[in-house]
Image (tube, helix red, strand yellow):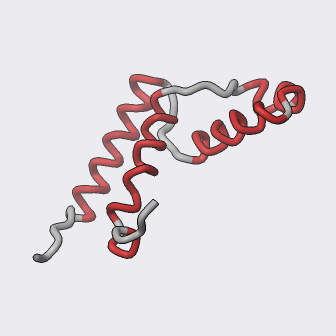
Amino acid sequence: MKAKYWSPYLAGACAGLVLVLSVWFAGKYFGASTSFVTSAGMIEKVFSESHVAQTDYFVKSPQQIDWQWMFVQWGADRFPACVPEFRDIQI
């Protein structure tokens, strides 16, 4: 059975629409890097809360679970199912 894929033009247009809507409604750009840094800050807080409290970035951007973090984590959970090489890996 041949796999069906989205048109790259349609996928790009949808990603652009999500970006515009995220800025319009939430006032934030949509991106994954902030979510990964937030995750790192949450993990680091377990081991050294005082270090996180003194880091300039984390003082300005507190580590909290928001819609962007949940969306990136949701996508990361589903990535292996999208790539044929990862489908057979048992976790």
Q: Is residue 47 left or right of residue 20?
A: right
Q: Is residue 3 above or below residue 13?
A: below
- Coordinates of residue 78 in the picture (x, y in percent): 37, 53
Q: Is residue 13 left or right of residue 56?
A: left
Q: Is residue 7 above or below residue 56?
A: below
Q: Is residue 80 above or below residue 17?
A: below
- Coordinates of residue 82 in the picture (x, y in percent): 32, 63
At x 78%, y 24%, the residue is: 59
The answer to which of 53 and 90 lies nearer the viewer is 90
Image quarter (top left, top right, bottom left or bottom right) of the N terminus: bottom left
**Which residue is most to the front?**
90
Residue 8, by quadrant, is: bottom left
Residue 35, by quadrant, is: top right
At x 17%, y 71%, the residue is: 3
The answer to which of 27 and 81 lies nearer the viewer is 81
At x 61%, y 41%, the residue is: 34
Residue 42, by quadrant, is: top right
The answer to which of 60 and 4 lies nearer the viewer is 4
- Coordinates of residue 58 in the picture (x, y in percent): 76, 30
